[in-house]
Image (cartoon, rainbow, N blue to C red):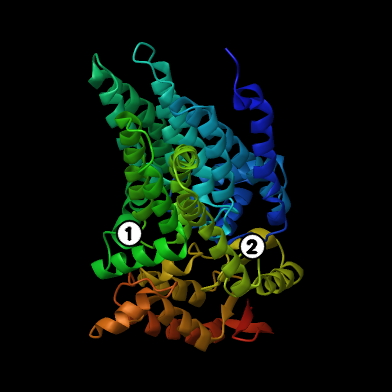
Amino acid sequence: MTKTFFEQYEKYILFVIILFAIGIRLPYLNCPIQVDEGAYTYMAHFWLKGESLYKTRFFNVLPGLPFLYAIILKFFGESPVAIRVFISFYNALTLVFLYFAAKKLFGIKEAVITASIYAYLSWLPHIRGISGKELFMLLPCVVALYFFLCYDPKKQYHLFLCSVFSALAIFIRQSALPLVGHFALFSFLQTPKKPLKAVVIYLLGVGIPFVFILTYGYLTMGKERFLYQVFRYRIDTNSIFVGPVLYHILRCLYSLGVSGVVFLILAVIVANFYLPSELPQKTFLFSYFLFSFLGAIIGGNWFFHYYLQLIPIFSLWLGWGTVAIMEKTTLKIKAIYVGLLIIPFIFYLLAVAYTKDHCLGPEEGNAVNKKVVSYITHHTTPEETIYGLFYHNPSIYFLAKRKAGAPYLFRDELLFVPKRLEEIEKYIKDKKIDHLITYDLDYTLSIVRMHCEYDKNNTMNFVKRCFMPNFTPFCQDYPLQITLVRNIFKAIPQQYVKSKILAFPKFKVIIWNRRE
């Protein structure tokens, strides 16, 4: 039997796709540490020095991601370049497993297109293709998918391996948890004899690693604090179960549109009209998409990068659909389909034009971070603590190699639970922090209002606010936060003295030293 072109040159084609996936990430090598990434690198750095993971900062997820960053810092180095190089090869490994998953589902031609689409979509930085929890989560998710597709009811070990990698994905990001439902469901459906046994085997494989994680959490923080911090905090404070329903509807529409994800959904719909009528494959993919989408939206903030975990399923469906589109449709349909695929890239170009930065860096710009880190590094000692109140990028702690003097590194951790602002005030009055980093009071208050404020009696005002990126109506007891921030700024000069004022166009950064 004569081999097709794809079969004859499969290894070379896959190698070229891997090079493409790594090559398009080369511009990211010098991208600075991103906001979330700054917190994880900080935790990993001090974890390697023996600090307890959950005592380094308020950390409300499982420890998989800091562990991965610890591996990067230990074996690859602590520079942004080293981190980006690791991520490039890590993502390429995800691509390889997705290729073989697509090959099992459809065939070699579809697998080639699936891998190519994944390389392109997972690179887009406005859905955090540079770094982040979602990008790291994709590898174990895709490996779990591959092993499930290898599953034979007569040989259960593939199902067990699927469950183990499902657990690893959850350790990196809890939004992978809904996929357990997908695999458990299809374990039942695809096992003719003793389907419940298959489900139990899968759930045991997921559950056993959790015993070790829960044990670590209990020993580190105690039962109540660990359960609140890792499981209950997000659901009760910052999720789709909190805040006005209208907010979630509008933010869903906004995030799907501006991220470009809606056009990928439309491309899938267009392709679906020309796909073969194999019900099992369509049912499997549709279920995987639904459970992945549930994981993406459960966070409630509707950040664009939450949709990154949908990229594998989009790639599979579009890889399958592209073959059908190219073989069965007119030039007009082909043009519409390709146009839908490239719109997310066009949105990225528009974002670059707006931010003047291909890395789509933090809102205040990386120049602020560089100056603050430089000053801290040269005017404090490694034994002293620092704390940036409402500071935009937690990477200052990692880059300056200084411990945080308070556990709350992100703005929402302070704004959503106002009693934490009272904690910060007490830290300041007791002089537990050696060096404070603040913005000027007016800018700090504008940050609070930007996140929390809206007119509850004016529906149109609320609707407009829902389309502003930083607005999150999860601030308990607002405007109490305004009063608490003013109290903090009254307390600071009593215990701290200004050391340096860094002036920027929109604000000032003030560095304070503790009074002796």
| Residue name at image x 49 percent, y 39 percent | 319
Q: Which of the 4 image quarters holds residue 510?
A: bottom right
Image coordinates of residue 37 in percent, x first then y, are: 58, 56
From the viewer's perspective, is the residue at label 2 or at label 1 nearer? 2
| Residue name at image x 51 percent, y 54 percent | 335
Q: In front here: 166 or 48? A: 166
Give the residue type that dot 1 points to.
Answer: Ser
Image coordinates of residue 293 in percent, x first then y, are: 36, 49
Image coordinates of residue 359 in percent, x first then y, are: 64, 62
Image coordinates of residue 96 in percent, x first then y, are: 58, 33
Q: Which of the 4 image quarters holds residue 398?
A: bottom right
**As displayed, is residue 108 above or below residue 30?**
above
Of the numbered discs 2 and 1, the one sitting upstream in the chain is: 1
Provide the residue designation for mark 2: 359
Q: In front here: 334 or 48? A: 334
Q: Quadrant of the C terminus?
A: bottom right
Viewer can see residue 401:
no
- The crowding category of the residue bearing disc 1, from other C-alpha atoms within 10 Å (few below 14, some 14 to 19, many at least 20), is some
**As displayed, is residue 59 above or below residue 471?**
above
Viewer can see residue 418:
yes
| Residue name at image x 61 percent, y 53 percent | 41
Name the secondary structure under disc 1.
loop
Seen as rendered, the residue at the extreme front is: 330
**As displayed, is residue 162 above or below residue 252?**
above
Judged left or right of residue 28, residue 191 is left
Give the residue type that dot 2 points to.
Answer: Cys
The dot on residue 239 is: 1
- How far apart are labels 2 and 1 at the CA level? 27 Å
